[in-house]
Structure formats: structure tokens, C-alpha cells
Image: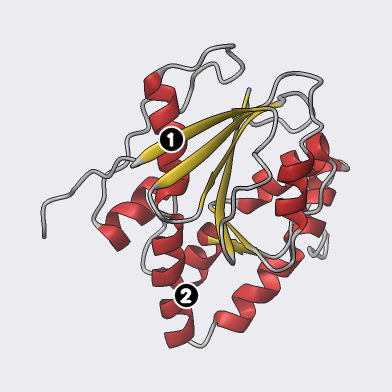
Amino acid sequence: MPKLTKREPELIELHRGDIPSNVSFGDSVAVDTETQGLDLGRDRLCIVQLSGGDGVCHLIQIKADEYDAPNLKILLADTAVTKIFHFARFDVAILRRYLDVTVSPIFCTKIASKLVRTYTDRHGLKDVTRELLNIELSKEQQSSDWAADELSEDQLIYAASDVLNLHDIRDKLQAMLLREGRLELAQACFDFLPTRAQLDLDGWDDTDIFAHS
């Protein structure tokens, strides 16, 4: 097996409150969020990370009660730009709750991984990145205070790294989905994500609405 490599962002741009109107990501943008925790009803949105897959990562720091980010909202709702997530279910829900935006269209690399990497139960971003790209991600800053006024350099690099490789991962998984004849199935799952996110926000997060019982 080839030796694992590490990849760091070529440039990290930190923005306060919104992304500048002149930033363009082409037809697809990698997106992630950092929050105070994983409880949609309790933990607030703190950071939104964006990358066009070119090594440049834009981090938008959002303060409490300052969720008016018009340029970001326009990007997230732009149907001409695919938003690439890993575990989009949570991110789409937290963005709906705090920015009041319906994100579309979506490609979720975690859903794609589960549909096509059926030989493993390891579908976390770290595992998928390691296998498909031979890149090692650090998760040391996963549990840290993302609401802090000043973010550390380690926090910035960690947050940027979560979107740095998503375009390449998307391309690998899309090819595998096509090979296995599951691309249309994956797309149907992606299209359902805004509804799944709304169910989570409305209290059906632990309920299998398709179950017989």
C-alpha cells in the first residue's frame, strides 16, 4: 500500500458574517459546517466552509443572532451549483434552521459511499479520504469551541480540510456509482435530503417513517 500523504489548503480565506459577492465556485462547491454540537434543537451554527476544489477554502464565521448572510444564501440555493457534502443530512438541516435556506442540488459523499462501498462499514470522511485518495485527515480539532471569537490556526486548518478533498472524493464515488448502476438511486437519495432535513427539524429524527411498526 502506498504511504499515506497529507494535504493542506493552499489558501484559507476567513470571512465574517458572509462571503463576498465576487467569489465564484463554478458549477460545484464543497460545503461543511461547524456547530457547537450535533443537537439540531440546541447547538447553533458557527462556521460554514466552502471550497471550489482548487485548494482554496473560504470559512465564514457566523456570530450568534447574526444569520443574515445574503450572498451565502444565494449560493446555497443556486440550482446551477451542486453542493457537495459529507453527511449532508445534518448540514442541510442546520443551514435550514439558521439561514432559512433550502440547499439544492446536493451530492452527499457519505450516502454515495454507503451505496457503493458495500464491502466496508467505514464511511466516515477520514476513512473515505484515506481509501479513495490515500490522504490522511487529522481529526484533532473535531471537538473544540467553534463559537470562539478568535479561531486558532489548527481550527482553521481542520475546518478547511473537511472541504478540501470533497470534489475529488465525489468524482471517485460517482465513477463507482456509474460502474455499479446505482447513480440514479443515489440521485434520488440526494433529492430527498431537504425533506429528510425538515423531518429532523420537526422532530422525526429518530423515527423510521417507512417502517411497518
Q: Residue shown at 39%/70% (left/top)?
A: 172
The image quarter in which residue 41 lies: top right
Rendered view: 75 above or below 170: above
Tell which of 170 and 128 is nearer to you: 170
Which is nearer the eye, 203 or 101? 101
Say which element carries label 1: strand
Q: How packed is label 2: few (under 14 Cα within 10 Å), some, or many (20 or more)?
A: many
Residue drawn where x is 43% and y is 70% of the image: 171
Residue 121 against residue 22 in the figure, above or below:
below
Q: Where residue 99 sits in the image (x, y, percent)?
A: 80, 38
* Image mark count: 2
Q: Is residue 79 above or below residue 126?
A: below
In this figure, which residue is indicated by the disc labeled 1? 12
User: Which image quadrant is residue 59 in?
Assistant: top right
**Residue placed most toward the observer, 72 or 186:** 72
Q: Residue 90: x percent and y percent? A: 67, 44
Q: Element under label 2? A: helix
The amino acid type, in three-letter code, at marker 1 is Ile
Q: Quadrant of the C terminus?
A: bottom right
173 or 65, nearer to the observer: 65
Percent position of residue 183, x then y: 56, 81
30 shown above or below 156: below
User: Left or right: where does residue 135 sit relative to residue 117?
Assistant: left
Q: Mark 2 points at which residue?
A: 174
Residue 14 can be seen, yes or no: yes
